[in-house]
Image: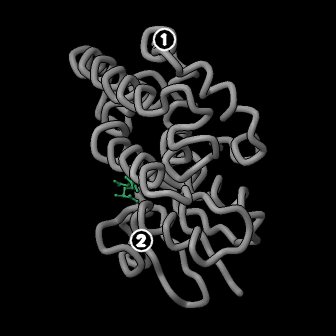
């Protein structure tokens, strides 16, 4: 079996995939494609992903793009613990978390952590988009923590793909002066306390 991950470690999406690979204890190679250097738009990467994004995986010659598809595929084909809940309601919770994070969460959170950590990447420090990003991030996190309720993880008692989508962007938020403001959401510190002790989290720091 050969498995190659294309992407660099500063990407939250790449970290999501790497956390799954660590949870599965899978062996893989990583080919670094650096967003800061524009490498996703080089012809050799556009041949892998026509829209110029990372991550991409190649599993025995089969390429998968888009993090949602990559996560579902790898969870299906790799041995080890399942990151897909075994009942319909919890599967829906995991998929809702994934969809909310992908559609609304990432863009909101990148406006906040990008402002402090990668201002050039987001086109400079714009205070209006920072304020909007803080409000939108709180809305997203509030909804996800409401969905988690009293469970240990977003989709129930076990870690799922939904948690792995959310964790990397939250890790960046914790490194910013806005952390207290954005992350003081009911349930967040309980969830975060579990995520940050996972070996899959500790062994995939953004480089
Ligand atoms: N829809 C894509 C989004 C991935 C994405 O936005 N990746 C960013 C890095 S975190 C990227 O490749 N950006 C390169 C660019 O836009 O130039 C997915 O789900 O995989």
Q: Quadrant of residue 47?
A: bottom left
Q: Residue at x 68, y 25 (%)?
A: 193
Q: Residue 26 bears which disc, if any? A: none
User: Vertically, is 184 above or below 199?
Assistant: above
In the rendering, at what x and y percent does residue 41 appear? 36, 66
Quadrant occupied by the N terminus? bottom right
Disc 1 secondary structure class? loop
Disc 2 secondary structure class? strand
Q: Nearer the viewer, mark 2 or mark 1?
A: 1
Residue on which disc 1 sits: 184
In the rendering, at what x and y percent does residue 203 appear? 76, 46
Whether disc 2's CB lies below 8 Å from ligand 1 is answered yes
Residue on which disc 2 sits: 65
**Rendered image coloring scheme:** one colour
Instruction: Give the quadrant of ligand 1.
Output: bottom left
In the rendered structure, which disc, 2 or 1, sits on the residue that comes first in sequence? 2
Mark 2: few, some, or many residues within 10 Å (few <14, many ≥20)?
some
Q: Residue at x 36, y 75 (%)?
A: 46
In the rendering, at what x and y percent does residue 63 appear? 47, 82
In the rendering, at what x and y percent does residue 14 appear? 54, 55
In the picture, measured across the screen, residue 58 lies left or right of residue 198, that is left
In the picture, measured across the screen, residue 199 lies left or right of residue 165, that is right
In the picture, measured across the screen, residue 34 lies left or right of residue 194, that is left
Q: Residue at x 65, y 67 (%)?
A: 30
The residue closer to the viewer here, 195 or 110, is 195
User: Vertically, is 114 above or below 185?
Assistant: below
């Amino acid at each position: 079996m050969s498995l190659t991950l294309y992407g660099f470690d500063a990407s939250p999406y790449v970290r999501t995939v790497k956390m799954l690979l660590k949870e599965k204890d899978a062996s893989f190679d990583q080919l670094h494609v650096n967003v800061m250097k524009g490498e996703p738009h080089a012809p050799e990467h556009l041949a892998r992903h026509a829209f110029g994004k990372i991550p991409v995986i190649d599993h025995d010659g089969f390429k998968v793009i888009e993090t949602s598809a990559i996560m579902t595929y790898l969870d299906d084909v790799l041995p080890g613990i399942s990151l897909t809940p075994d009942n319909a309601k919890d599967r829906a919770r995991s998929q809702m978390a994934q969809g909310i994070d992908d559609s609304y969460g990432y863009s909101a959170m990148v406006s906040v952590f990008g402002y402090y950590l990668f201002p050039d990447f987001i086109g400079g420090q714009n205070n209006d988009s920072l304020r909007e990003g803080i409000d939108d991030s709180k809305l997203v996190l509030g909804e996800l923590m409401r969905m988690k309720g009293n469970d240990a993880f977003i989709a129930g008692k076990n870690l799922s793909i939904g948690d792995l989508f959310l964790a990397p962007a939250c890790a960046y938020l914790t490194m910013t002066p806005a952390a207290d403001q954005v992350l003081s959401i009911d349930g967040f510190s309980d969830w975060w306390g579990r995520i940050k002790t996972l070996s899959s989290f500790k062994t995939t720091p953004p480089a």
